Image (cartoon, helix red, strand yellow):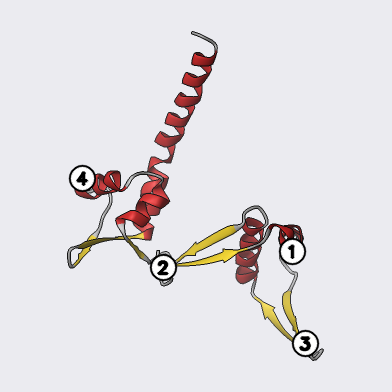
């Protein structure tokens, strides 16, 4: 995915505990609490800025997710993706993405000879297919249990 579509963040494992503590502090704020950020420069001077409740919620969510994973990707909702990118997000093969596009289940537009999909449409399809995917996963677990029990 191109940088205009996605921004990636990386956090080394040793920094996860401090990041989790930061998320806990932000998550524990009350509705009337004020959130401020302070930058301490190398010369000792400081700069502070108030953070809106909405921005604090976003930062809290990012810190929470970064505390449990090494890499995080933030995607723009109006971004356009290639079928390959959509396949990665959906967890399916590129030919299956193309079938969904050809059947009309996944809207797309052509840019020259290339197909482009809106991230919002890809995520909507992912939500729509989630119950079916969960049912298939459950069926696989049940099948594996039956096989291991020799039935």
Q: Which residue is mark 3?
A: 42
Tell me the residue at 61%/71% (across/down).
Answer: 55
Outermost residue, top side: 151
Q: Residue at x 66, y 63 (%)?
A: 60
Spatial CA span between label 1 and label 3:
22 Å
Look at the picture and state if 37 lies above or below 151: below
User: Within 10 angstroms of label 4, few (less than 14), some, or many (20 or more) residues?
Assistant: few
Report if the CB atoms under discs 4 and 2 are less than 8 Å apart.
no
| x and y percentages locating residue 34 in the rendered image | 74, 73
Percent position of residue 116, x then y: 27, 62
Contact, mark 1 vs mark 2 (Cβ under 8 Å): no
Most extreme residue toward the right is 44
- The percent coordinates of residue 29 (x first, y second) are 74, 64
Q: Nearer the viewer, mark 4 or mark 2?
A: 2
Q: Which element carries disc 4, helix, strand or loop?
A: helix
Q: Which residue is mark 1?
A: 22
Q: 54 or 124, which lies in front?
A: 124
Q: Residue at x 56, y 60 (%)?
A: 72
Q: State if disc 2 and disc 3 touch (CB < 8 Å).
A: no
């Amino acid at each position: 995915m191109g940088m205009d579509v996605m921004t990636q963040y990386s956090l080394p494992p040793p920094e996860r505990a401090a990041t989790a503590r930061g998320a806990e502090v932000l998550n524990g704020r009350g509705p009337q609490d004020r959130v401020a950020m302070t930058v301490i420069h190398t010369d000792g001077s400081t700069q502070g800025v108030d953070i809106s409740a909405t921005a604090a919620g976003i930062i809290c969510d990012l810190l929470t997710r970064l505390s449990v994973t090494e890499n995080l990707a933030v995607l723009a909702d109006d971004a356009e993706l290639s079928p390959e990118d959509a396949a990665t997000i959906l967890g399916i093969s590129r030919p299956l993405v193309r079938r969904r596009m050809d059947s009309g289940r996944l809207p797309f537009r052509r840019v020259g000879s290339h197909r482009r999909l809106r991230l919002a449409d890809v995520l909507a399809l992912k939500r729509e297919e989630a119950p079916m995917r969960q049912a298939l996963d459950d069926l696989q677990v049940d099948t594996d249990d039956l096989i291991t029990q020799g039935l």
